[in-house]
Amino acid sequence: QQGEVSNTPEAHDQSYLCPVTVGGQTLNLDFDTGSADLWVYSTLMPTSEQRGHSVYNPDSSSSSNAQSDNSWTIQYSDGSGASGTVYADKVVVGSVTATSQAVEAATSVSSAFIKETHNDGLLGLAFSSINTVQPTQQTTFFDTVKSTLAKPLFTAHLKKGAPGSYDFGYIDTSKYTGSITYAHVDTSNGLWEFTASGYAVGSGSTVATPYDSIADTGTSLLYLPTEIVAAYYGEVNGAMYDSSQGGYTVPCDSNLPDFVAIIGGSRHTVPGSYINYAPISETSCFGGIQANDGIGHSVFGDVFLKSQFVVFDGSNSPRVGFAKQ
Ligand SMILES: O[C@H]1CN[C@@H](c2nc(-c3ccc(C(F)(F)F)cc3)no2)C1
């Protein structure tokens, strides 16, 4: 099988949500290549916490089966999280169907989620080795359907301020220009982890330096090593590290330089305009590139990914591919 599902950006492209049917009920989920749990808002949550969201009601699904011995709890890198119990149910993404997918029904979600009223849960697309269900670890939607897909891969086509798509099982050559360059993926941390080999700022010369990175659709910004971030904002008049904002800010009227990442031996360019992320005040804007301090690797989040067509190849030799949109 193969199929395509649309994604729609939230404000500032902070996240991208996709319609998914779970037991015949449609919810809008945040597809996250940085985690491996498919969890949903549910009728098991306090009614007040359900308000404003679409929720999964396992009792009204004719295909749900409770996995009563299993539970889950997940923490995201921003400190938000959720926890709950587990059902097996039919999950459909585009036209791709998992007849029996672990659906992690939330009984509790952190406050940060409650106010994201368009977000009804997450669909993890990292490797199943980091799924949090205990005592019996479960597979991601991609791993559940992988053997039934025409090709064992999915692609991400995120756009700046406009709907895009995720495709499962095939590469749509109309969604990119030029060629796709691939980088080997190290799956030992359960992530789409690869090594970028250099960078350039604007029309500056390429700096060859390897940096361990992940492709993470669930992260909004581009997090890079501190020396690369300093080199970037060193080219921006009025850029500053503002500890009260927790990162670099730029004057909103800046003409920002492009950022080029060298991956798979090719140049992959983020337009400077993508790096003016969101207004903080009348004149100050938050930078889309920030330091990866404390994360342990660089994170190629949506600020970068929305400039590329990205292939997540789950074959026996996993790899990530990037092409210009
Ligand atoms: O953990 C890493 C795995 N991928 C990144 C990720 N972070 C979230 C997230 C989504 C929504 C929210 C909230 F709604 F604002 F609460 C918070 C975090 N989703 O993927 C980071």
Image (cartoon, rainbow, N blue to C red):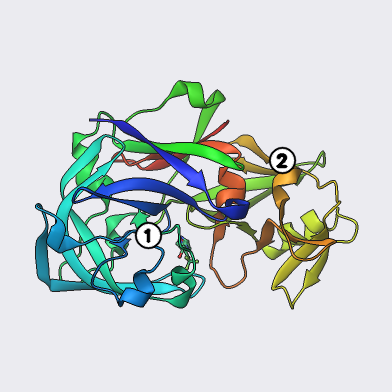
Q: Quadrant of residue 277?
A: bottom right
Q: Nearer the viewer, mark 2 or mark 1?
A: 1
**Measuring 74% from the left and 78% from the top, which residue is drawn there?**
244
Q: Check disc 2 and report its element: helix, strand or loop.
A: loop
Q: At label 2, which amino acid type do we have?
A: Pro
Tag 1's secondary structure?
Answer: loop
Looking at the rendered structure, the number of numbered marks drawn on it comes to 2
What's the mark number on residue 120? 1
Name the quadrant of the N terminus: top left
Q: Is residue 28 above or below residue 45?
A: above
Question: Image point 33% across, 41% down: which residue?
Answer: 317
Q: x, y (%) of residue 229?
A: 73, 59
- Tag 2 residue: 271
Q: Earlier in the sequence, mark 2 or mark 1?
A: 1
Q: Nearer the viewer, residue 115 or 94?
A: 115
Using the image, determine if residue 26 lies above or below residue 149. Answer: below
Q: Position of residue 170 (x, y in %)?
A: 34, 28
Looking at the picture, tell me which residue is in the foreground, 5 or 190: 5
- Sort mark 2 into few (<14), some (14-19) or many (20+) by Cα contacts within 10 Å: some
